[in-house]
Image (cartoon, helix red, strand yellow):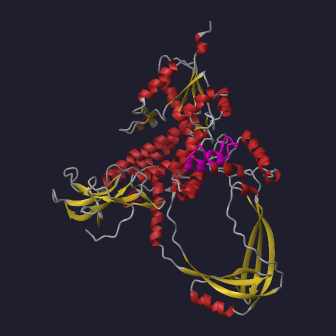
Amino acid sequence: MKDRKESKKNLVVVESPTKARTINKILGKGFFVISSMGHIVDLPQKKLGIDIDNGFEPEYRVMKGKVKTLREISRQAKSAGAIYLATDPDREGEAISWHIKNSLEKKKDIKDKKFLRVIFHEITKEAIREAFNNPQDINYHKVSAQQARRVLDRLVGYLLSPFLWKKVSRGLSAGRVQSVALKFIVQREEAIKAFRPQKYYYLNVVFVKDGIEFKGRIVKYKGKNVEFRDKEKAVAVKEVLEGKKFVVNSFVKKIVRRRPQPPFITSTLQQEAFSRFRLPASRTMFIAQRLYEGIDMPQGEALGLITYMRTDSFFVSESARRKVKEFIRNEWGEKFLAAGEYKFKTKGQVQAAHECIRPTHLDIYPEETRKFLDKETAGIYEIIWRRFIASFMRELEIETQQAKLHGGDYEIVARGSKAIFSGFQRVWPIEIKEVLLPSLRESETIAAKRIDIEEHTTKPPARFNDASLVKLLEEKGIGRPSTYASTIATLVKRNYIIREKGSFVPTELGKIVVKLLEKFFPDVLDENFTAHLEEELDRVEAGDVDWRKVIEEFYPGFKEEIEKAGREVKKEFISTGEKCPQCGRPLVIRWSRKGRFVSCSGYPHCKYARPLTTGVRCPQEGCGGELVERRNRRGQVFYGCSNFPKCRYTTTKLPESENA
């Protein structure tokens, strides 16, 4: 008879049900896979939960709604052989494993069980089996880095938010990363409003030779760069040059090699997904998580189609490098394979074991996935597949041509280019504008066909969108790629920004919050200070500094700012100029998550409130209501009738109407 212990199933704990289902199919009968549904332990909701006088010790609690989940994990753990902690390979995943282990070890029947940490970056048979054959210990440096971030964010959010409640309105929040991101958006809007357009002009000389028409631009006068800021000057120069012959000073051809871009990391995937598909960062991450955790294939099996999607490393495993090179050879031939592997520079400290975002099965072509994936998911998979393969292919080769000509004291430059080897463009097409120049000889004289004046107007800086804001945050070292989507979502949710044609526009509330934080909490809005904290968290993860030391350096100055702000704080309102119909006090504008509304300044003693109308009548016949500004869940503004739900008229653009 077999020993009962030998027949016990091993318990595997992961975060999500989809991941659990995929891994369960791979591991088979000897394992039982269960989902924790994310974190099961966190700081308490209704108090600070940090013992400031005891080394900033966090007071963790089982989260509301997770008691039943923990109870079920505990029940399965009691009858299990070993307990495998298979959460995600980042700081959050490590912390989840640590919290689960700590919670289970408190149980009498479980504390002596064997706990094993398994790390994998893709959910494939090979990767899962490799991870379970080589289990590890929990990485406590990584746990400490997550704990430091959580404590920092709680200190800032819990102590700063009440200041905003007193100063502006209840329900507001502030955070280290979101406040800096909001500042960037507000500053950009201010720059746009301050912008004054200016006209400028180019002078283009058009030539014809051997049946080829080409143009050169006037760039210098007597060896110095020339600009045309007014049309009169451009017209005067045109008149001087008309009818003159031009002499070719030089004609140079060069081969320029353009390298492919690196494979995706979290931030660049978010940027590309917005640029191509206009997908918000949060939607991109949701789709990428689906592709990572497992997709039901037509054959009936579940496969993780990409590697882990939260990463800031360009590292590629030896096995994946070998497979992609062989794939390129088979598909396009040896000449399309890069001569050597490209070195892509990473920012900050990243763990080499963390891979880039890449496909797990190169033989699952993007065209095939369109049969079983929705359009958005298939699109995200395709750009990941193509970008990864392209990053191992040969450079694009472009022949550039440059001709310099002189007409009197003026120098004209004409440029041409053409692709001579497509290289990585076979997989990752980029736009190359081909301009052909005829063959020109030095000292050759050529007449101008005509001279054109090209008028331009300077444009204001563009508003931020998901792609450009993520790019700036990454360049400045603010936050981490894994937090960008939630940061943007929070700004929208708090009504600090709205989405307008895909771009971010700060609300009046967002501007007020930035103004107050700049006055009372300059460090919170200082991008250099915030970036320094991120570097310190990286040092914690590397084991170079204790997490408490990071908090100890931050907290005293922050506490001093909190106390000073508390002494100086005074409630500020934006008055409507009206009196409350119930008590006669002034009516003011307040904010909620759904947008602005009118309220009595005597709240909570007087609870009078009404929507903030636009002054435009509802066009619905016989309604008589006014249109009010509202927001949907994605932060987009629309207008609805003040008589809702009786009248359900909505529009995204205010119709022309007489004022109410």
Towards the viewer: 625 or 478: 625
Position of the C terminus by quadrant: bottom left
Place residue 515 in its image quadrant.
Answer: bottom left
511 above or below 232? above
Which stretch did the figure color magenta? 355-381
For the point 58% across and 33% down, the residue is 22
Q: Position of residue 329 (x, y in %)?
A: 80, 48
Query: Is 231 part of what is drawn in magenta?
Result: no
Q: Position of residue 496 (x, y in %)?
A: 40, 56
The picture places residue 332, in percent across and down from the top left corner, at 78, 51
| Vertical side of 219 occupied by 346: above or below | above
Q: Residue at x 55, y 19 (%)?
A: 80
Residue 525 in view, yes or no: no
Is 559 left or right of 209, judged from the image as shown? left
Position of 409 compared to 476: left or right? right
Residue 635 position within the rendered picture, expressed as x and y whole percent measured from the top left: 42, 55
In what quadrant of the picture does the N terminus appear? top right
Instruction: Establish if 327 lies above or below 212.
Output: above
**Residue at the extreme left:** 583
Q: State whether residue 463 is above or below residue 28.
A: below
Q: How many marks?
A: 0
